[in-house]
Image (cartoon, helix red, strand yellow):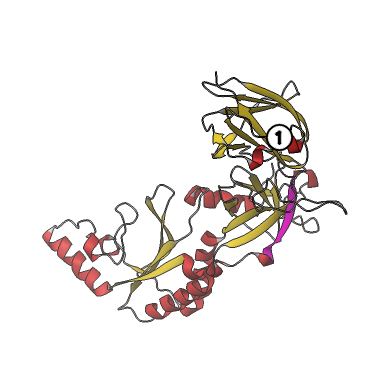
Amino acid sequence: MVKGPAQRQLEELDEIFGPGYFEHGRLIFTVARDIHGVMKVAHRVQAKVNEALGAMVEVIMEHVKHELWLKLHESSASCSLKKGMEVPECQVTDIPDGIRQHPYRRDHLPTLEVLLLWDDPEGITRGRCLYTCAHPELPSMDQVDSIFGQIEPYFAKRWLVVQLYLAPLTTGEFEEPTDAGYEDGHVGAGAAVTLLACHPLGFASDPGVTPVTHVSQCQPLCFRAVTDHAGQAKMCFLPAALNKIQVAETDRFHGTEVSLLGSDIKPLDQGCTQVTVRLTPKATAGITVHVFQMPRKLPSSEETDGIIDWAAEEREALSTAVVEVSSFEESAAPIVLKHRGHDAFFTEAGGLSEGCVNILVSCNGYEPEERTVMLLVGPNEFYVPMRAL
């Protein structure tokens, strides 16, 4: 596959930070305060960082003195002393060993340096130097934009939270609307979400030295995530002018695609971008099976033509029962219903397809019961009394 500028930038960022990236970090500005003009440059760069990055990073100033660096090196040279490691109590913030060499231990004191610290997914502090200027070189006010231009590319990625909801079922003109089986639009965990960032690979009118890439090889950058129990999928991606959010089709809902423009993505100083996606549910049938002990004396059914209304009667629940629902398709595996409380068992993963199914109920100490029923779109409730052995 042909790699464009965005693909190469993404690979460089992933090599440094990994696919997980980070949400909060620390920028350590090391400034030689006794050198004229350096503090002013540092404050101007800090202002641009605060304006662009906001609360994503905490800016920490670390002041050093070139005069002290000279004295330390003169003492080390004359007394043949070895400069030791950094003392945590004297640091402006926690900087683990191995991330950097302390400014006073270097052969040339940095007049201005920007160090980024962040925690990886395992909680280990990582670091990378984004900019450094060593004595005798000095940064100037004319270089403020250039210095910030070296820092900004490391914060090119953005965080996105996609919240999935199920829309109400579509009903006919003479049908009553129902949300049965969808628990107020709850999607739950395990739904696959893909984001396609449509970055350009070049310009056909200005190919330059390299030939124009064929359109069949112009593929968007792909980022994937899976929803948690709250129906949220969180991912970090490299935004383009046009981004497409795709939700894969499942047995419960149809797949969909939503466009996310680059202008609608929040800047870093405003936090994470949140997008709500409404999914069209499939016409499925919810099923609830009530399993209980058959009473020794059956309730009266004279007024109901011999049909007992078990919903209106007191029932002794059998919570240890096992309820399996299987369709008449040969390749379909039986579904075990989950106990929800009292005597009710329901499908944990959503509804089932409309049509005939077979219900098999078993429980220790009771005769197994098997029934063939017809499921219709919407809620379906069945009552299964069990006879003791």
Vertical position of residue 132 compared to residue 199: above or below:
below
Task: Tell me if residue 262 is in the magenta stretch.
Answer: yes
Nearer to me, 132 or 173: 173
Q: Residue at x 63, y 27 (%)?
A: 324
- Tell which residue pokes out farthest to the top in this image: 389
Q: Is residue 287 left or right of residue 212?
A: left
Query: Three-letter amino acid code at disc 1?
Result: Ser
Q: Position of residue 242 (x, y in %)?
A: 72, 59
With 39 as the anchor, is 183 left or right in this view? Answer: right
| Residue interval drawn in magenta | 253-263
Asked whether residue 43 appears in the rendered view, the answer is: yes
Q: State whether residue 165 is above or below residue 265.
A: above
Could you say whether the residue bearing mark 1 is in a helix, strand or loop?
loop
In the depicted structure, whether residue 61 falls above or below residue 222: below
Is 26 located above or below residue 338 in the figure? Answer: below
Asked whether 314 or 330 is in front, the reply is: 314
Q: Which residue is mark 1?
A: 301
**Toward the viewer: 227 or 325?**
325
Q: Quadrant of residue 216?
A: top right
What residue is shown at x 57% (from left), y 60% (from top)? 156
Q: Is residue 299 magenta?
A: no
Percent position of residue 115, x then y: 40, 62
Which residue does the image show at 50% across and 48% down from the upper left?
18
Q: Position of residue 332 (x, y in %)?
A: 71, 25
Is residue 201 something that shows in the picture?
Answer: no
Specify the quadrant that holds the C terminus: top right
Provide residue 342's location: percent of width, then percent of height.
54, 39
